[in-house]
Amino acid sequence: MKRIILHVDMDAFFAAVEQREHPELKGKPVIIGADPRGGRGRGVVSTCSYEARKFGVHSAMPISQAYRLCPHGIYLPPNGALYQQVSQNIFQIFYEFTDLVEPVSIDEAFLDVTGSVRLFGDGPTIAQKIKQRIKEKERLSASIGVAPNKYLAKIASDLQKPDGLVVVETDQIETFLWPLDISRLWGAGERTQQILRKMGINTIGDLARFPPQVLKQKLGSAGEHFYRLAHGFDERPVITREEVKSVSNEHTFGKDVDDMDVVRKQLVYLAEKVGYRLRKKGLKGKTIHLKLRYDNFSTITRNMTISPPTNQTRQIVDVALDLFEKNYISGRKVRLVGVGVSGFDTQAARQTNLFDVLDEKQQKLDQVQDLLADRFGRHIVQRAESLKKKKK
Ligand code: TTP
Ligand code: MG
């Protein structure tokens, strides 16, 4: 059966919330992020209003550069707690239309509304209604893509920002999808894009017309996946918070490791990554897992259950390291480590969303790290514990 998938993404989210709270900022270039200190500030732009984008300001740009481009802009620090609250309200609106909601980030989600058509009308009608509800209840604007799958919906939501509503059918992919640059290929990082460009593939259309066997040779199963995306095929389901069973990351060392400080640092890094992913999905889990594989491939998994459920990096790090100290057999070389969290308290996650009042300092730290990671990639912000000494 043909699915109807919506991708909803709020417009200039943090900046729009500030403009709503302070009506005198409406229509003005508002820049959220670090303090510019008259052009000498450090740090980056979180986001900015569309008025500021006209000056070339954008997310992740150094704040000093933003100041040079837009000295008369209004610079504000982010108010994370407020944005979380607004995010929660917006997600409640999504749940009015379907239970099948996949949170992607603080201002973005996929909705499968295939089963909601009888109640609310066809895909574009539902999208229009959701936009209307968000305007009425939160006085904010969203852009929505409507398509038969997640990939096409995601691309569509971006095409007419702000306040956009774009509907895409599978038979439109040649006109709609193929002219786009491969940077729009969902899941293809910088390196994959480089490989593709070297092969002369610059647009999604180039990719769609490329011999699939060659793609597979160069990129393995990912090559096949990208080829399917380029033809507008994407069978991936919308995964609700309740359906996510666990979030985990693991790492295989290039060479078996006998220095346990290296292993510990890797564990901290993996725990950070897991914490980040949990917070993005609005999940908290009570069981923390450690996976350890020795050089002879013998593998152990151990877990510990804590209360209340968490998504704080600090707690995941502590438990993972504790499990490691208790279970590592000294003298043995390690080939692989992994960290995971399961046992989700989906109700609590939905109610309190990403932050509660406990342990505010750790939450602030996580929040700041998440903001930076969103922009620069996760590698740029790591706790001192996980920073590997660079070999000269
Ligand atoms: P986005 O949806 O990427 O951006 P946006 O909502 O501000 O603007 P757009 O209309 O283009 O969607 O991100 C959502 C929020 O996440 C954004 O308002 C601020 C935050 N964010 C950062 O803090 N740093 C970043 O680098 C990015 C991309 C987003
Ligand atoms: Mg947005």
Image (cartoon, rainbow, N blue to C red):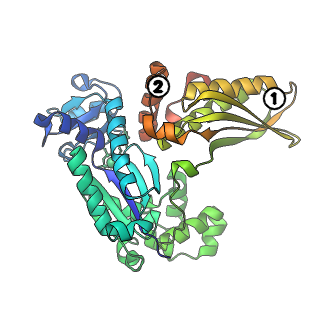
**Residue on which disc 2 sits:** 363
Please determine whether, in this image, residue 35 is positioned above or below residue 343: above
Q: Amino acid at mark 1?
A: Asp
Q: Amino acid at mark 2?
A: Gln
Relative horizontal placement of residue 305, taking residue 104 as reference (left or right): right
SS class, disc 2: helix
Q: x, y (%) of residue 184?
A: 42, 60
Q: Is residue 96 above or below residue 81?
A: below
The relative height of residue 369 versus residue 165 in the rendered view (above or below) is: above
Q: Which residue is depicted at the point 50% across and 34% down? A: 380
Quick one: quadrant of the C terminus? Answer: top right
Q: x, y percentage for residue 146?
A: 36, 66
Pick the residue in front: 137 or 9.
137
* Mark 2 surroundings: few (<14), some (14-19) or many (≥20) residues within 10 A: some
Query: Which residue sits at x=53%, y=55%?
Result: 239
Residue toward you, 62 or 146: 146
Residue for badge 1: 258
Residue at image coords 67%, 31%:
267
